[in-house]
Image (spheres, rainbow, N blue to C red):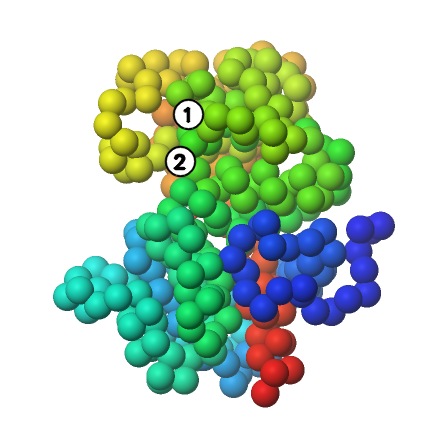
């Protein structure tokens, strides 16, 4: 591919957000993930690459697939893994984030994968503790490995990301997946459109070089790929008055069902980061159809996270 380079090192020590990665970094991650995807298809799905590395997964917010995906990626690379979730920790006793993490690092941990409800938590940690940090989602801010696995899955299905038209649909305002996807796709040369109700669209977002469309049927006619996001009800609840009258009305205007898909008149690729609220942003007949790459996204998540962990750990060997 023309975007690929011969570099074998990332330009950054941490993965805090897509904002920090260059197009060359992304190409390197994809190339590395291609190799790991091949490993994952073997009968013995394990390589010794991170045998001397210890990784802590710190989850201060609920997660199923991202936590499992990281843990599996770490174990496939033979890293030592410790898992921590805030529900069962001293955070509930009033300990600060830096104290919690420094106590874990005192046990000789090299890398931290962190999910946290506060935007900027990963950046903050990277400035105050001595370990490689990977942001696994910080509030409404960024979720870089999700954007990487999404773009990787588009590249796998369509052959390339450059020049593709991708619409991101739904609760853009509260979605870290939307921001990371926008940044990643634009770095790779895709055209990006955001679609959702005006109340869930960040103001001035068009200044990021993306199109904004409030009519889903028009957006679907324009795109090659539609990434259907979940309505972040748990985040909206903190904000006061509701953003739309009812989930039923949202589903009528912004949900993707078979009828709406067929009205497009040609095939497009359907994505969703999960967890899906079936019948709200997407119906089962579309989510489970041949147009959907939702399970490919999950599968690719492991290979892409292996690539990120492997490349960042390379820096640890260099520094020592
Ligand atoms: C996303 C997240 O947590 O931001 N999910 C995920 O990582 N697979 C999207 C969501 O929660 O809707």
Q: Is residue 26 left or right of residue 235?
A: right
Asked if the residue under mark 2 is in contact with the one under mark 1, i.e. CB atoms within 8 Å, the reply is yes
Displayed quadrant of residue 11 = bottom right
> Which label belongs to residue 200?
1
Q: Is residue 250 above or below residue 192?
A: above
* Residue under the image location 64 percent in, 82 percent down: 318
Secondary structure at numbered mark 1: helix
Query: Would residue 294 be visible to someone looking at this image?
Result: no
Q: Give coordinates of residue 65: x percent, y percent.
A: 41, 52
* Residue under the image location 71 percent in, 44 percent down: 188
* Residue under the image location 65 percent in, 31 percent down: 209
Q: Is residue 277 left or right of residue 73?
A: left
Q: Give coordinates of residue 288: x percent, y percent.
A: 48, 33
Q: Earlier in the sequence, mark 1 or mark 2?
A: 2
Q: Is mark 2 within 8 Å of ligand 1?
A: no
Q: Is residue 78 above or below residue 219?
A: below
Query: Would residue 232 be visible to someone looking at this image?
Result: yes
Q: Which residue is mark 2?
A: 174
Displayed quadrant of residue 240 = top left
Estimate how packed mark 2 is, as few (under 14), some (14 to 19) or many (20 or more) residues with alpha carbons within 10 Å.
Answer: many
């Amino acid at each position: 591919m023309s975007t690929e380079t011969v570099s074998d090192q990332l330009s950054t020590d941490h993965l805090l957000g897509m904002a920090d990665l260059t197009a060359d970094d992304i190409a390197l991650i994809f190339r590395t993930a291609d190799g790991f995807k091949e490993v994952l298809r073997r009968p013995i799905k394990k390589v010794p690459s991170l045998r001397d590395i210890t990784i802590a997964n710190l989850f201060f917010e609920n997660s199923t697939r991202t936590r499992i995906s990281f843990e599996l990626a770490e174990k496939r690379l033979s890293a030592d893994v410790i898992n921590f979730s805030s529900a069962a920790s001293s955070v509930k006793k009033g300990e600060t984030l830096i104290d919690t993490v420094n106590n874990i690092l005192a046990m000789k941990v090299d890398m931290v994968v962190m999910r946290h409800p506060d935007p900027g938590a990963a950046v903050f940690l990277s400035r105050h503790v001595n370990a490689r940090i990977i942001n696994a989602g910080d509030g409404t801010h960024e979720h870089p490995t999700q954007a990487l696995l999404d773009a990787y899955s588009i590249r796998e299905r369509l052959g390339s990301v450059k020049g593709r038209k991708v619409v991101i649909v739904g609760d853009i305002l509260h979605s870290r997946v939307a921001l990371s996807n926008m940044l990643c796709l634009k770095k790779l040369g895709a055209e990006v459109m955001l679609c959702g109700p005006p109340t869930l669209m960040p103001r001035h977002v068009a200044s990021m070089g993306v199109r904004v469309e409030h009519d889903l049927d028009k957006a679907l006619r324009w795109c090659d790929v539609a990434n259907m996001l979940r309505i972040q009800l748990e985040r909206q609840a903190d904000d006061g008055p509701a953003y739309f009258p009812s989930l039923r009305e949202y589903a009528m205007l912004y949900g993707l069902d078979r009828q709406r898909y067929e009205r497009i008149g040609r095939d497009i690729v359907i994505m969703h980061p999960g967890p899906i609220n079936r019948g709200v942003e997407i119906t089962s007949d579309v989510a489970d159809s041949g147009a959907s790459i939702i399970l490919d996204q999950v599968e690719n998540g492991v290979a892409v996270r292996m690539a990120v962990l492997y490349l960042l750990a390379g820096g640890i060997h260099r520094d020592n």
